[in-house]
Amino acid sequence: MPYPDDLISLDLDAVIQALAHSELLKDAPPEVLRRVQDECVPMALPAGELLLSPQHENQHVYVLLSGLLGLHFEAVSQPEVRELTPGSSVGEMSVLDDAHPRAYVVAKEDSLVLPLHRELVLWLIDEVDVVARNLLRLMTRRRRRHDTQPIARDQERLFDLANDVYVDALTGVYNRRWLDLALTRLLQPSSERDMSRPLTVLLIDADFFKDYNDHNGHLAGDRALVALSETLRFTLRLSDVCVRYGGEEFLVLLPNTEVPEARAVAERVRRAVQMRAIAMPDGTPLPGITVSIGLASSEGLDTPEAVIAAADAQLYQAKHGGRNRVCP
């Protein structure tokens, strides 16, 4: 779709058509596309204009209607890590987390975006199944793409330990051996920016997992753990790290994350696990699972044992408070 000279002359039917082919709204019903078009006003971005940055709060997911956007970590002056083309969207993670963006997004040429406010995005996720699936699919693709690209420099020291000896064979996430090395490093700030924001951890436990194994068999239990680990990897942010802590327990490391932001991540994980379908290798459906999550910040704590013990205490409260919840 060509870049318009002014917004008044924009063909609204063309907006509907562009939305119908976008990553986020592909295959959405016509009435949903019309509601999005009715509630959102296209926004012009001149070449070089900044759309998102870690310094500014974001309340919108932006669908790129025309032009090109570039995504950068750390600063706009740093090398571009991804180019966004028409049909792409950006801002999903900060909207879902209700937190500041983790990257800079800038217009590479004159561009046109459609801002979808957070309330509309949450409505779409709750009410339109295809949009929820599209969002999960595009975030999964980004995660896989990220796994093949260089990690931002302030995260490289976490991942230089990545090889088979540090990966859990069943779930494919990091294991306790990796954690023993990495957690100490994470608690040693590498910059003033690191020192200003704490490490927060989530200790996650599958609810009633012994009963699940007893009633469905250990192979079913393994399938549930694999589904849980996949849900964690696809739901977490790019900077977050997942570790199989032991048995049905997983530990998630959230670097440079304050408690309110971490709680939003934890709630998103809890909901995603509850909605996740589980099946045997032959497709036979299995019962779903839920998780209890204990959250703790490293602020005021200076050892790995202290941080994990604090998270474990909160997990205890979550389980004894009825399970399928986040504490505090």
Image (spheres, rainbow, N blue to C red):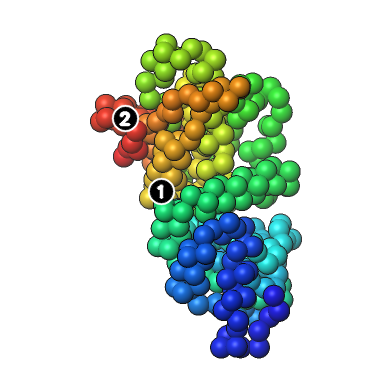
Q: Residue at x 46, y 15 (%)?
A: 216
Q: Secondary structure at mark 2?
A: loop
- Residue at the spot 42% in from the left edge and 53% down from the top edge: 127
The residue pinned by badge 2 equals 323
The quadrant where residue 312 appears: top left
In the image, residue 69 sits, relative to residue 305, either above or below, namely: below
Q: How many marks?
A: 2
Which of 60 and 246 lies nearest the eye of the viewer? 60
The C terminus lies in quadrant: top left
Question: Crowding at label 2, few (<14), some or many (≥20) Cα neighbours within 10 Å?
Answer: many
Q: Is residue 261 above or below residue 205?
A: below
Q: Quadrant of residue 75?
A: bottom right
Q: Position of residue 213 (x, y in %)?
A: 45, 14
User: Which element carries disc 1, helix, strand or loop?
Assistant: helix
Q: Is residue 252 above or below residue 320?
A: below
Q: Amino acid at mark 1?
A: Ala
Q: Residues within 10 Å of mark 1 (few under 14, many from 20)?
A: some
Residue that mark 1 sits on: 264
Image coordinates for residue 226, horizontal then vertical, percent: 56, 26
Residue for point 71% across, 58% down: 82
The earlier-in-sequence mark between 1 and 2 is: 1
Residue 101 visible to an observer of this rendering: no
Give the foreground label among 1 and 2.
Answer: 2
Q: Position of residue 60 (x, y in %)?
A: 49, 66
Question: Looking at the figure, which quarter contains the N terminus?
Answer: bottom right
Farthest front residue in view:
30
Image coordinates of residue 99 in percent, x first then y, are 45, 57
The amino acid pointed to by label 2 is Arg
- Position of 66 relative to 199 (above/below): below
Mark-to-mark CA distance, 1 and 2: 17 Å
Can I make out residue 265 in this image?
A: yes
Residue situated in front as seen by the camera: 299 or 214: 214
